[in-house]
Image: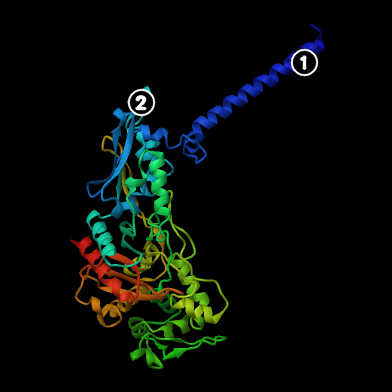
């Protein structure tokens, strides 16, 4: 063979060897680092079908199974089932032939046994190639309180409603209820045609029962947002006893339409203590604060510190919609936004977090929904570790806001709750343009002795925010029992 030919063959062998090595490296990378991502990709048509052959682990709360799997077709597939499905749907979500939501999504790899942490507790199964049994997900919710909240919302006769309750010290979500709701069993059937029909039926309903109103919907918060504005005023150097502007009407600079109060009384005076303006929910006071002093930028900064402007991550794959305080240079729009109208919107979760920050000495803890993860043998492979979300208030500012919220219940717009388990709170009644109903808010905390729960309730119906207060009281009663 000629020397030139030898060199050509050598180069060919080198190139071939490099290509083989590159192919092996790519296969190794895909199998070692991308396998789970590829398996869970929405572009993988076998993504969910194959996993119905796995005995998926349960979702539990307070020792109750909220979601579990049962064998069908002689054990070749497993059907998902849900206890009190409509009540717990915002927590569990569903696991269908098309997609998964809620904890079914956030803890999917633990539930289906593919989480690497489970392999160490089931080493023999992993070694011989058997599927690793699915693990257990323990939710943070208080099962009884969740049922109480759902039933109260359902029986309120309102258009839509939602409630969130947090452990203010840890951030654990104890209640996350939403109405109208749906039964996850209906959409989690293995029959693709029936599942499709169920989804179409639910999506055709105007009030969107599949939507978790506690985290995925935003509403104008009305006067409950005055809690954030009051915090901005305290941050600017005021105290609860500082005299603030009031009056029967307030016209912002460059505005032709004055803002009035829903009632007279103390709000009609020219100047009153901040605590009185808060307890009586004086629109004129807080509109002035938003437009002029401390002004839009101060309120916007305070709202941002509470979490407005960003989606709030709860667990992997679960994040609440972003609450919004508008960016505007119009004093008229700032005045409207400061009383929780106009372009100001919030989720019930966000307003529960505002309340939790006030109750927890100015510190907001990150909300979470998973308390513990367990392998099939009962061993713990993961446990929640509470972490700080934000610190928008000093301890002194938080104490003054608590005094103001307690004045709401003692003598202000929430006085109908005197004698209940609600110690402090804030009402909010937001007009909805062109609608016959209001968004009726109550945010508050309790129980009266050693308060630890922060609650936000919104209901859609004619009337005032105080009408949502009794639901908050029922939730606190259930949590404290």
The answer to whether residue 68 is above or below residue 336 is: above
Tell me if 470 is positioned left or right of 336 in this view.
left
Residue at 45% over, 69% down: 345
Mark number displayed over residue 130: 2
Q: How is the image coloured?
A: rainbow
The quarter of the displayed image where residue 48 is located: top left
The kind of secondary structure element at disc 2 is loop
Sequence-wise, the earlier of marks 1 and 2 is 1
Q: Nearer the viewer, residue 463 or 307?
A: 463
The quarter of the displayed image where residue 176 is located: bottom left
Residue at 62% over, 22% down: 20
How many marks the image carries: the answer is 2
The quarter of the displayed image where residue 403 is located: bottom left
Q: Which residue is mark 1?
A: 8
Tell me if 437 is positioned left or right of 288 in this view.
left
Mark number displayed over residue 353: none
Which quadrant of the rendered structure holds the C terminus?
bottom left
Q: Dot 1: within a 10 Å radius of its alpha carbon, few (fewer than 14), some, or many (20 or more) residues?
A: few
Which quadrant of the rendered structure holds the N terminus?
top right
Q: Nearer the viewer, residue 359 or 149?
A: 149
Q: Nearer the viewer, residue 363 or 12?
A: 12
């Amino acid at each position: 063979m000629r020397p030139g030919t030898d060199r050509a063959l050598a180069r060919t062998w080198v190139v071939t060897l490099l290509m083989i090595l590159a192919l092996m490296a790519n296969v190794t990378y895909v199998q070692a680092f991308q396998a789970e991502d590829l398996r869970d990709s929405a572009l993988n048509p076998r993504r969910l079908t194959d996993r119905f052959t796995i005995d998926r682990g349960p979702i539990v709360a307070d020792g109750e199974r909220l979601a579990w799997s049962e064998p069908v077709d002689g054990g070749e597939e497993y059907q998902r089932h849900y206890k009190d499905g409509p009540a717990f749907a915002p927590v569990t979500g569903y696991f269908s032939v098309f997609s998964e939501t809620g904890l079914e999504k956030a803890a999917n790899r633990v539930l289906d046994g593919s989480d690497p942490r489970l392999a160490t507790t089931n080493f023999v199964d992993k070694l011989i190639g058997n599927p690793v049994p699915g693990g257990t997900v323990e939710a943070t919710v208080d099962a009884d309180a969740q049922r109480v909240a759902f039933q109260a919302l359902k029986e309120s006769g309102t258009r839509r409603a939602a409630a969130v309750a947090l452990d203010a010290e840890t951030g654990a979500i104890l209640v996350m209820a939403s109405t109208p709701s749906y039964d996850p069993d209906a959409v989690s059937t293995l029959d693709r045609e029936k599942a499709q029909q169920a989804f179409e039926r639910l999506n055709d309903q105007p009030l969107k029962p599949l939507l978790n109103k506690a985290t995925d919907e935003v509403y104008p918060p009305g006067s409950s947002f005055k809690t954030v504005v009051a915090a901005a005023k305290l941050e600017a150097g005021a105290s609860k006893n500082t005299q603030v502007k009031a009056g029967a009407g307030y016209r912002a600079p460059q505005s032709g339409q004055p803002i009035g109060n829903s009632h007279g009384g103390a709000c009609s005076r020219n100047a009153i203590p901040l605590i009185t303006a808060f307890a009586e929910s004086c629109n004129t006071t807080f509109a002035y604060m938003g437009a002029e002093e401390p002004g839009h930028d101060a309120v916007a900064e305070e709202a941002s510190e509470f979490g407005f402007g960003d989606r709030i991550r709860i667990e992997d794959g679960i994040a609440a919609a972003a609450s919004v305080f508008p960016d505007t240079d119009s004093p008229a729009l700032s005045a409207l936004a400061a009383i929780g109208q106009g372009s100001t919107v919030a989720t019930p979760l966000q307003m529960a977090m505002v309340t939790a920050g006030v109750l927890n000495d100015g510190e907001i803890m990150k909300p979470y929904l998973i308390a513990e993860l367990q392998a099939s043998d009962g061993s713990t492979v993961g446990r929640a570790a509470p972490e700080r979300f934000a610190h928008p208030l000093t301890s002194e500012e938080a104490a003054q806001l608590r005094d103001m919220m307690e004045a709401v219940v003692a003598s202000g717009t929430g006085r109908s709750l005197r004698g209940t388990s609600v110690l402090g709170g804030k009402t909010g009644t937001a007009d909805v343009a062109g609608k016959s109903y209001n968004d009726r808010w109550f945010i508050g905390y309790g129980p009266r002795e050693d308060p630890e729960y922060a609650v936000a309730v919104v209901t859609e119906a004619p009337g005032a925010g105080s009408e949502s207060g009794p639901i908050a009281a029922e939730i606190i009663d259930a949590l404290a029992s």
